[in-house]
Structures are given as structure tokens and as C-alpha cells.
Amino acid sequence: MIPSWVLDVFAAIMLVVAAVSAARLVAARSWRRGGRSAALADIDVAHLLMGIAMAGTLVAALRTWPDGAWEVVFGVLTAWFGYRVARDARISGVRALAGGHCAPHLVHAGAMLYMFAAVSAPAAHESGGMGGMSGGAGGMRTLELPFLALLFALVLVGYCIWDLDQVSGPGTSGHYSLAVARAAPPGPVLAAVGARAAGAAAAGASGASAGLVSVAASGLADAIVAAPPVAEPAGIAQVPPASGPADGTGVLAPWVATACRIAMGVTMAFMLVIMI
Amino acid sequence: MSEISAGGVRPAWRSTPGTGAETRRAAPDVRRLLQLALAGLWLLDGVLQYQAFMFSKGFSDMLADSASGNPGVVARPISWDATLVGHHLAALNASFATIQLLLGIGIAWRPTVRVALAASVAWSLGVWWFGEGLGLVLTGNVSPVSGAPGAVILYALLAVLLWPSDRGSPDGPSPFAAARAVGAPVARVVWLVLWLSLAYFALLPANRAPQALHDMIAGMTDGEPGWLAALDRGAAALVAHQGLAASVVLAIALVVVAVGVYLPAPVARGSLVLAVVVAAVFWVFGQAFGEIMTGGATDLNSAPLLALLALAYWPAPAPSQANEGTATS
């Protein structure tokens, strides 16, 4: 049996993720006004809900809602991100499936839905649900269709690794601009960013100068890439240095959301594997 | 530094086609992608190490079992280690799992890639001895089908071959990713020795016995899902009483793979495809996906590592074919 303190540690990490996601929602509330709230908030809402659900799954004492309610929640989230991915796919083709902004969130939501839907029924009855993976007298919870659990775990690990690579890179990808925010040169530099991101940043970042695209303003990188598509052609944008909380520093920094996603991906893979 | 340059641009497959902007974007660096695959395997190993079985006496017993058949000088430290782990199971196993998680994260996190790769070599060598009994290669009862010479030593080999330096080819671009750190001659010798050793293991008397391969594959079915157990039983039936023939055919295939990297690029590619196919057959029928669905696997076994190695030896496009970004990495 897995020692309870191991599960406690993972649950604590998930609670931190939930708290950080809640803080991001609060901190970005004003920034999100202007008709794009759904496009910007869904990631943090998903992280918040997943963090709470996973903590409750790992430690029975942290259990909140019944499994059925979580199934509905993650069913809705899966449908929502599925819609977002499909919408991206119409614009970007199959690349949206492989590397699009919403694909990881779709996988996360799908994995959560699978976890709650496929937990073996007898075990669930024994301990009144999925809460508490160490299982107590009921033993370890197991999942039906274990090959699917393995598949989800592999994909989640893949996204974690990719996120780590991207977030630690020089940061011109536009998706994750940690390095840009931290190490941008004092003067304007060239960076290739899509006009789609550029349009969103220009519209949403108060600190962006006219004609410039603030990649630091794309500090809410998750949000920016997820923003409603505008003109598709990509271009070369000038990137001023990062500044100001509205530009995505502090809790709104892009690496915070990515770190949350990495932590959740690892924890989710852990949960799937130990429930096989 | 290549690992930096590789990430310094948006991956080409994320660019918007037909805009001209992609001309500034490099193709992904193959070596970096392989490093990321290695990181993913370490991360998955870390997760697997957290399974309930690893916190049970079964794990320390499994460690102790790897001592059997090994010479005393090898076996005694294994037995000592297994006893130690048995006494401090929770703390040590949690440490093992966390170390492997950190290795995966460290390799994927660009600033720490060198430290993590170096640490992974040290960790792999330790685990190869104390956890896998040197892959049982000294026992004479080991088969490449079931994972010889041990998955973890292949992690170390990959870490060396994927080391982020470019001192291997002073005369121009390296012919393949694995050559960049150590040079093409050394990399080819490593490949040759590895696959010839696999061919040798395939021909060991224990593997030539009429029912050897059958029994090995049939023995993988315990605890597996029904569909996988059925698959393995079918494969076992195919090689029943065919131990010698199967060993010879397998050895020939492994020798072809071994020498393939010395042949012209088109032939080399063919041999590498054969290597991947052989690895896939090992993984499905001889290793049951690393027995990952039994709850007792510590890794995915050797086959994915062999396939990854094969990709590291895939001939690079000729300089005229390489795009600008690739050349800069």
C-alpha cells in the first residue's frame, strides 16, 4: 500500500495548484473584462476544479462532491475543450491537435472524466466513492480499461515534458514567454509571433504601445493564444521588455499557469498509474 | 549550445504555413527531441516507482532476486542493498521515485539538462548493479527478448550519446544525432557492440532450448489484461518447440541491425527500421509492454530504449537538404 504521506504530498500540491488558479482568476478579473472572459478564464477554472477534485481523490478527508457530480463537471469541461480544439483545428488544421493551446487541457479534462467514470464500481461502493486512494479496508481503487489509463498517462507525461522544454526555452514561441519576461533585452527585439496572438495582445494589454506587440503582455500566454482568432497571417513583432502586473507578471505570469499544468499532469499520471 | 538554439525558435510545426514567417523558424532539433523522449521515460519511471507494489516487501524481494546467479562480488552488494531497502521501504522507495521524477524534469528543463543527464548516468549505473544485477548478463540466463542487457543501462547509454555537445564532427555536420557528442566512429562502435551482444545473448544455450522462447513468452501472461495475455499465448504457441530456429533467425536479424550503421544511408535506414520493428516485437510479445499493466513494473523495459537508440542513429539529411534552422542547431 502506498504510504498515506505520499498521497498527502500530492494532494497538497494539488491544493496549491487550486489556490494559485483561484488567485489568477481574482487577479485577472479586471483584465478579463471586455467580452473575452470565457476565453481567458476557462483554463484557470479548469485548473481550480481539477486541483480540488484530485486532492479529494487522493485524500478522503479532502473529498468535496460525489463522483457523479465530478463526472458531470469534467464531462462539461471535456466537451468545452473539445469544442475549442475543434475550433482551432478548423483554423490551424491538425496542428491544433498536436500542439494547439487547448489540446493539453482537453487531455487533462478527458483523463479526469475517465478517472471518475472508470473507477471500479465495487471498490467505489466499499469506501463510499473514489476519495482516498490508499483505500483503507477497501484496498486500492482500480480503473477499468487499464490500457486507456496507460495511454492517458503517456500523453500526460508527454505534455509535461513538452511544457517543461518550452517554458525553459528562450521563449520566442509565443506560447510560453517566461524567458522573454525574464531576459528580454532592453531594446525592442524581433520575435515571430502570430498576428492572432498579436491582435489579442494589442487589444488586451494596456501597456502595449501602438504598433508594437508586447510579448510580455502576452504574459497571459495561455489566454492570449486561446483568444478568439483574428487575422491569421503571422508576422514579425517588436517586443518591448516586460512591465506591470497587467502584462502577466506575478501570479498572472505565464509560467505560473504552465507550472500548474505540469504539476497536474504529473499528479494525474501518477494517479492513473497507481490505479491501473 | 544546441539545446538552447533548439528551443530558441518556434517549432516549425507550430508555424503558420504560407505566410513566410516559417522561414525564420527552424525544424526541431532531433537530438533535443530525443532528449525529451528520454526525459519522458524517466518521468514515467518515477511515476511507476510510486506504485503500491514498490512500497511492499515484494519490491525488496525483487531486488534480492537479481542477485541470484551473479558472481559473489556482484551479488553481495545487491543482497545488502535489498536488505537495506526492505528495512526502510517507504522512505527509500519514495526517494527512488522522486529522484527519477527529478531526472525527467531536469532533462526536460533546458538549464539543467547537463546536470540531469550526468546524474542519470550515475543513477542508471547504480540501478543496473543494485536493482537489476547487471542485467543478469553474467548469469548466462538472459535474453534480449525479455530485456537484456537491462533497460536502465540503455538509459545511461542514451544520456551519453545525447549529451549536448558538438565535438564529434570537426569536418562538418554529424551523420546522425548520436554522433554529435562522441563522434560517428565511437557511436557506431557502441551500436555494433550493443546489437552484437544482443545477438550473442539470443544464441545462449538457455535460449536455444526447444521450449525456451515459448516458456518465456507464455510466462508473461500472469496479471496481464485478457487481450494481452491472449496475444502472448498466441505468440508462444507459434514458437513452441522452435527455440533453436527462433534464436538463429533472431540472431541474424540482430547482426544485420548491428552492421547496418556502417552501410550507406539507404541501407542504414532499412536496418534501423528493422531495429525498431525488432524492438516493437520484443516489447509486445517478450516484454508485455514492460508489464506496466500488472502494477509491478519499474520501467517500460528495454524495447522503447532500443527504438529510441535507433532513432538517434537515423541518418541526417544531406547538407543540401537540411534547412537553415537545422544547420544552426
Image: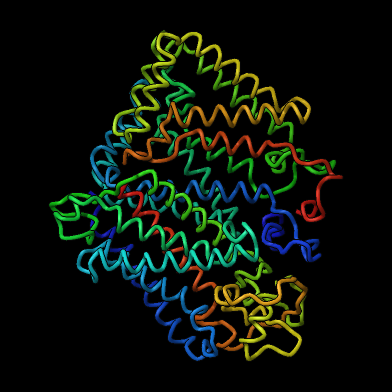
Counting from the top left corner in percent of width and height, residue A69 is at 27, 68
| Residue located at (56% from left, 16% from top) | B251
Counting from the top left corner in percent of width and height, residue B282 is at 49, 28
> Where is residue A124, by image quadrant?
bottom left
| Residue located at (41% from left, 63% from top) | A109
Question: Would you say B144 lies left or right of A98 here?
Answer: left
Of B61 and B212, the residue lying toward us: B212
Residue A148 drawn above or below residue A44: above
Q: In the rendered view of the protein, which quadrant contains the N terminus of chain B? A: bottom right
Of A156 and B297, the residue lying toward us: A156
Inspect this view and state whether residue A76 appears.
Answer: yes
Inspect this view and state whether residue B63 appears.
Answer: no
Question: Would you say B104 lies left or right of A88 here?
Answer: left
Of A140 and A111, the residue lying toward us: A111
User: Which colour scheme appears in the figure?
Assistant: rainbow
> Where is residue B215, by image quadrant?
top left
Counting from the top left corner in percent of width and height, residue A273 is at 35, 49
**Residue furthest to the right:** B320
Question: Would you say B37 lies left or right of B219 here?
Answer: right
Residue A139 drawn above or below residue B291: below
Residue B42 drawn above or below residue A195: above
What is the number of callouts on the image? 0
Counting from the top left corner in percent of width and height, residue A138 is at 15, 51
